[in-house]
Amino acid sequence: MKKYFLSVAMLSCMFLTSCMAPTSLYSWYDYEETTYQYNKKHTDKLQARVLEQYKKIEKQKGLRKVVPPGLYAERGFLLCKIGQTEEGIAFLKKEIEIYPESSKYISRIINQLEK
Amino acid sequence: MKNLIICALSALLLTSCASVITRGTQYPKMYEEKPVSIVIMPPINQTNFVEAKDYFYTTMYLPLVEKGYYVFSPYLTMEMLQEESAYDSELFLEADLNAFKNFLDADAAMFTIIKSWKRNNLGGALTAGVEYILRSTKTGETLYKREGLITVDTSVNSGGGGLAGALINIAATALNTATTDKVVAGRQCTYFVLSDMPEGKYGMNFGQDANQPAGKAFIKGTVKK
């Protein structure tokens, strides 16, 4: 009887674990909707919400456990646009570090910003 | 009689097996070229809704990234394309794409043609019809091509019966439809159409999905909001 309960408990655990396992490569939180709204209307409030989303996205629970391609670049670019150039460039460089395929384009942006 | 049934069943089995088209046969160039990075081109809008182009543009980024590709953020490329007078994708749909390889180091460019972008308040429906074409920047070949016509059902059923119930349902449906952004249908369309795309470098099934059954080149469907 004890064995039976143990088996049921183990199977339940396995089932629950499989249900909870992430299926997405990345965690996006509310990124899609927030950036969409900001794209429609450039307000300070929405800009703050977008920057908040970038911070959240650093906490990755997706399968790859890294920030999605393009997002460090996007964050860096936005920071540069609002005058936080030094921090912005650091994020742009981070994009190249994690995703070398972005090097050509992002380096070009960095060069323009550093002029 | 027994033999006849066996023959008929075998024929049926063979026919059903023969009709399965895999992703490898449907999208051979994707497996040959193995693009890593994708630039999203501004949509080509064939509808009367001018805003559809800008609103739809950013919806492709997330599903393509989730497919395992490096995708240049549309918020960055949008400015670049506008500055380089390349915001009209019509000019590039059949043209040489080498400039995107040289400038961005993008392996492929995703074009979209918005053919339908509708709202039906009384009927409770939002519809998006879009064709997706992924072209290689190296060879100019079409790597992936698929079209979708997706309707989002926004109808509301309050559960009330009789004439009063029906009127409440009509009003609630109209309100729900009117307050739902049409981009919701666009997102669903992208999600369905790109679901068939072979996975990219960062996907968990990269290079292993060639034998999976491929979907139809045109998909039409309705999803509930």
Image (tube, coloured by chain):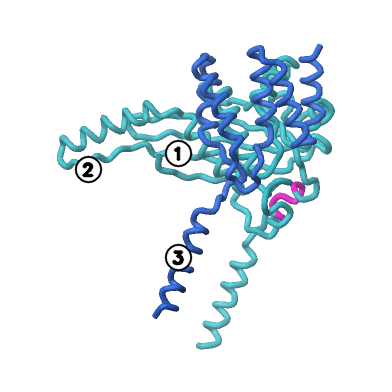
Q: Nearer the viewer, mark 1 or mark 2?
A: 2
Q: Please name the residue that numbered disc 3 is placed on.
A: A12
Q: How many marks?
A: 3
Q: Quadrant of residue B15?
A: bottom right
Q: Quadrant of residue B7?
A: bottom right
Q: According to the colouring, which chain is blue? A: A
Residue B85, percent from left and from top = 73, 16
Of the 4 image quadrants, the one containing the C terminus of chain A is: top right
Instruction: Kindly state the secondary structure of the residue where label 2 is placed.
Output: loop
Q: Please name the residue that numbered disc 2 is placed on.
A: B159
Residue B22 magenta-drawn? no
Label 1 to label 2: alpha-carbon separation:
23 Å
Query: Is residue B48 something that shows in the picture?
Result: no
Query: Is residue A11 something that shows in the picture?
Result: yes
**Label at residue B151:** 1
Instruction: Kindly state the secondary structure of the residue where label 1 is placed.
Output: strand
- Magenta segment, principal secondary structure? helix
- Do callouts 1 and 3 point to residues on the same chain? no
Question: What amino acid is found at the position of numbered circle 2 in the picture?
Answer: Gly
Q: Which residues are magenta?
A: B24-30
Q: Are marks 1 and 3 in contact (CB under 8 Å)?
A: no
Front residue of B61 and B50: B61
Question: What amino acid is found at the position of numbered circle 3 in the picture?
Answer: Ser
Q: According to the colouring, which chain is cyan? A: B
Residue for point 41% across, 74% down: A5
Residue A35, percent from left and from top = 55, 26
Side (left or right) of B216 relative to B152: right
Q: Nearer the viewer, mark 2 or mark 3?
A: 3
Front residue of B72 and B81: B72
Residue for point 73% across, 26% down: A92
Question: What amino acid is found at the position of numbered circle 1 in the picture?
Answer: Thr
